[in-house]
Amino acid sequence: MRNGIDQKKFISINLFFVLYIFIIFQVKLRFCYMLAYHKLIDSMFGLPDITIIVVGATVIVVIAALLYWGITFKGHD
Amino acid sequence: MAADLITISVVSLYFLGMLAIGAWASKKIKNTEDYLVAGRSLGFWVFILLMIGTVASGMSLLGVSGLGFKAGWPTIWEQIFVPLSIGFCIIFFGVKLHNVAKTAGYVTVQDYLAQRYESPVALRSLSAVAGIIVSLIYLVGQYTAIAIVLMWLFQIPLWLALVIATLVTTIYTAIGGLYAVAWASLIQSVILIIGVVIMAPVIIFYAGGFTHVNEFLSNVNPNLVMPWMPSGAFAPAYLVSFAVLLMVGLSCAPHVINNVLAIKDVKYFKWAPLIAFIIYTIAMFLLKFTGFAGAVMVKEGVFTLPNVPNAGDFVILYGIQYAMPIMALWAVFAVIVLAAVMSTTDRLMLTIGAMFSWDIYKKVLKPDADDKTVLLLSKIVVVLSALGTMLLAINPPEMLAILIWMGIGVMLSTFAVPLLAGLYWRGATREGALTAMTLGLVSSLTFGMLNYIKATVLGINFGTIPLHFSAYSFIIAILAMVIVSLLTKKTSEKVLDDTQTGWYISKL
């Protein structure tokens, strides 16, 4: 595997996304509802905490993953 | 509103600009490869903006804000997963396809499928026919969006709006091929992004500011500011299927994935996913917020939407009309919307032309056809596809977004499994691909229709199924691919090596 992303990285990216979706939509669900009801964090922009946390975290994770791709990808022609 | 001289001039200028690009591009066309893949010469920014322009469709301005108007924050995921589809397409399809295409000389993604699955006739034909069907469904949504804008701007009947839209888009696409589409998309995407970044904050400001908009929505219905709905559409389970639909479905759509065959250098794939995501996400978030602001303004009685079934799709148009009461600016905004819609429409028409003239005519029906004939046929099919979908768009659906998602759902179920399995699983066979593609296409069309008319079949109410309909047909396609592939003869090792098949993205 000389160029591009190697097998380990490829598998880790896949697992990372699967794990992330699982956490967000299965485990965090209950936690976030708890946050919403108890208002542990002051709401921003008139939004509930869970909206800020879940949407913000997703955007950050996506950018981090694409940044990782850019740094590790070498490419060839 | 009625159009004045300035409005007509601005829109005419835009149309003339597109036609000029078509005329310029037509001089660069020497053969079919120039016409369909721009001589594999697209540069970095042309490629990025072509990808954005191709993905940014009629739904991007009208449908996105229309859905935000209707269902609030739970629909925000659309604005993350649609931009991410560009990165998914480049990373999981683009790198490997581009590398193989350069040596094998692919013009369409069907060329890859035919080689990988050793099926030069059956799979190629099925794939091309399926591609044409789903592209036509998608194209109807695009023409509906163009018609909405022209009707609003010029107060003209739907048929006339459709004729104008079809005429302009068809001429520059037919004469200039992918060169014209790519350069037109570059300009259209720049217009779209700058226009949205300038105009969306103005609408949000006039609605009372971002915080006021969210607080107002929260008072109307607390679910409108949550990241998901408690049940039904946009509930967590639905959102997972929605994420797969948008990210994977769009990325394997023929009109999107074919773009990766046209770039000059694979190194462009290094930063293209991140740059495209950031640019497109900013614009799309702003558009969604505009839909929220429109909802507040309508509920506060600032303006009323027309009494039509797809009223939500008009919200951004009425919002800009209220927030910027200068007619010349409406014309500029109309150009922005037209740019978004036309950048997808032209690519779709070209893709349909390529699939018919190259995959069906040249590769199946008449392999000895000369290049001139294939090129001419491509242009004829571009014109015919435009005319056909124009007629279909005369009766637009209730929500633009629904029709476009249906198109993406069919694309996901039909193409994702044969492509992903073909690229990454050496055990995937021709029979597996044929079965997966056939069942994916038929089941997604069936489920999509049953879901749309909210039918109950065998005790299942398709109007209230917990996932997007395409998730079920996607699962059927996966099962078909795995089961049939395990039972049938393996593809030859030479072909698997030639097509770089295996559990990796890039290899020398």
Image (tube, rainbow, N blue to C red):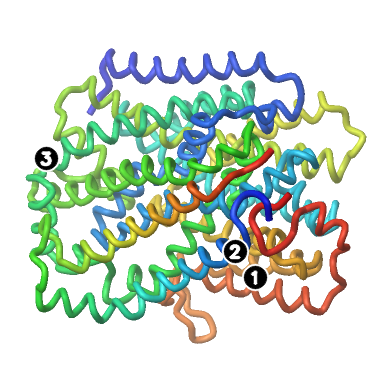
Residue highlighted by disc 1: B477
Element carrying mark 1: helix
Label ID, residue B413? 2
Q: Amino acid at mark 1?
A: Ala
Question: Could you tell me which residue is drawn at 44 percent across and 25 percent down?
Answer: B187
Kindly tell me whether residue B398 is visible in this rendering: no
For this orientation, the residue located farthest to the right is B368
Question: Could you tell me which residue is drawn at 19 percent across and 33 percent down?
Answer: B321
Pointer 1 and pointer 2: residues touching (CB < 8 Å)? yes
Q: Viewer-proximal residue, B472 or B463?
A: B472
Label ID, residue B152? none
Name the quadrant containing residue B92.
bottom right
Q: Earlier in the sequence, mark 2 or mark 3?
A: 3
Q: Position of residue B164 (x, y in %)?
A: 47, 26
Crowding at dot 2, Cα within 10 Å, few <14 / some 14-19 / many 20+, comes out as many
Q: Chain of mark 3?
A: B
Q: The N terminus of chain B lies in which quarter of the figure?
A: top left
Position of residue B169 relative to residue A42, above or below, is: above
Element carrying mark 3: helix
Element carrying mark 2: helix
Asked whether the residues under marks 1 and 2 belong to the same chain, the reply is yes
Question: Could you tell me which residue is drawn at 81 percent across and 40 percent down?
Answer: B361
Crowding at dot 3, Cα within 10 Å, few <14 / some 14-19 / many 20+, comes out as some
Q: Viewer-proximal residue, B4 or B259?
A: B259
Residue highlighted by disc 3: B205
Position of residue A46 relative to residue B105, above or below, is: below
Q: Chain of mark 1?
A: B
Q: Amino acid at mark 3?
A: Phe
Pointer 3 and pointer 1: residues touching (CB < 8 Å)? no
Q: Amino acid at mark 2?
A: Ser
Q: Earlier in the sequence, mark 3 or mark 1?
A: 3
